Image (cartoon, helix red, strand yellow):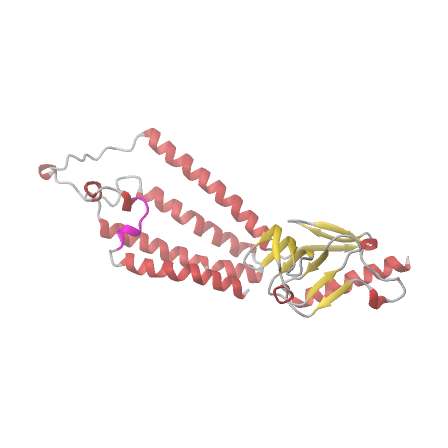
Amino acid sequence: MAATWIITGVIAVPMIIMAIFLLQGKGSFLIAGFNTMSAEKKAVYDTKALCRAVGILLLLITLFMFLLPIATYTGSKWLFYIFFFFVMFLPIGFALYANTGNRFKLPIDPASQTSGIARMPMSKGKKIGIVITILFTVLVFIGIGIMFYQGEKDPEVIVNGNGVTIKGMYGIHINYDDIYRGDGTSMSQLGIVLIERSMREIGLGRRTNGFGGFSAQKGNFVSDGARSQTLFVIADASPTIEIQRIVGSSVFISLRDAEKTRKLFEEIVDGVVESLQG
């Protein structure tokens, strides 16, 4: 959770500084597209009004950005949808607004026109091109957003008579027979351990094929000791469940709610015990 806030803050602080600068009607060099125009083309725009509008846009985006760590912590999909909608669609909506209808252009006195720049209406082909570009961008962002949201969710773990199933991204199924159990004579030898530390404290290691978000880590990792491990964890949440398999890497699981993690641990142990007794 702390990492989510830190990353959001690192992104937000420079955006706020830029927004304050732009709100003063300065900093047009920060505006993509406008800063590459020739001086002659820039002359027909109300630069101060454009800067202030972009400054307001940056402040709004920054405000909604803070919904992400809150949504991540609470697990609220609606907060995430609100964050995603505004952060992704505000720039797109502003781009449409700013690039249609000759907005932010200074009124021209026909008697004083000397530059030869005429206000030509946007062609139908150009409008269609803008719409297609925006739609494509929206679809890309939606896909990225859905993938990120699914990755940041708590792992969905199902314990039943057949074993432990972890659904979703990089999901696996662990049969009870696959769990290490020593010589089978002592419960203390079971390869299921509840570690009173977060996975970050234990050691996340290096990701080889997996998802690494603000807080969630899922997939295949290699520990600092070069041991393969499969993670379905919230990196800073504790405790952490370790399932040691007879063949294959150990599996680590943790949820944001510590009590839910402890309850899950008890369910897995009970399932293994029942399988031994059966």
273 to the left or right of 58: right
Is 188 inside the magenta-drawn segment?
A: no
178 to the left or right of 262: right
Locate residue 188, reporting x and y percent: 83, 68
Q: Residue at x 56, y 62 (%)?
A: 73
Query: Split into 4 quadrants, where in the image is the N terminus?
Result: bottom right
Above or below residue 45? Residue 133 is above
Q: Magenta segment, which residues?
A: 27-33
Query: Split into 4 quadrants, where in the image is the C terminus?
Result: bottom right
Q: Toward the viewer: 66 or 201?
A: 201
Residue furthest out toward the left: 111
Above or below residue 251? Residue 198 is below
Locate residue 97, reporting x and y percent: 33, 43
Q: Residue at x 21, y 41 (%)?
A: 41
258 to the left or right of 82: right
Residue furthest out toward the bottom: 196
Locate residue 154, reporting x and y percent: 63, 57
Q: Residue at x 71, y 55 (%)?
A: 157
Locate residue 32, reporting x and y percent: 33, 46
**Residue 98: quadrant of the picture:** top left
**Residue 191: quadrant of the picture:** bottom right
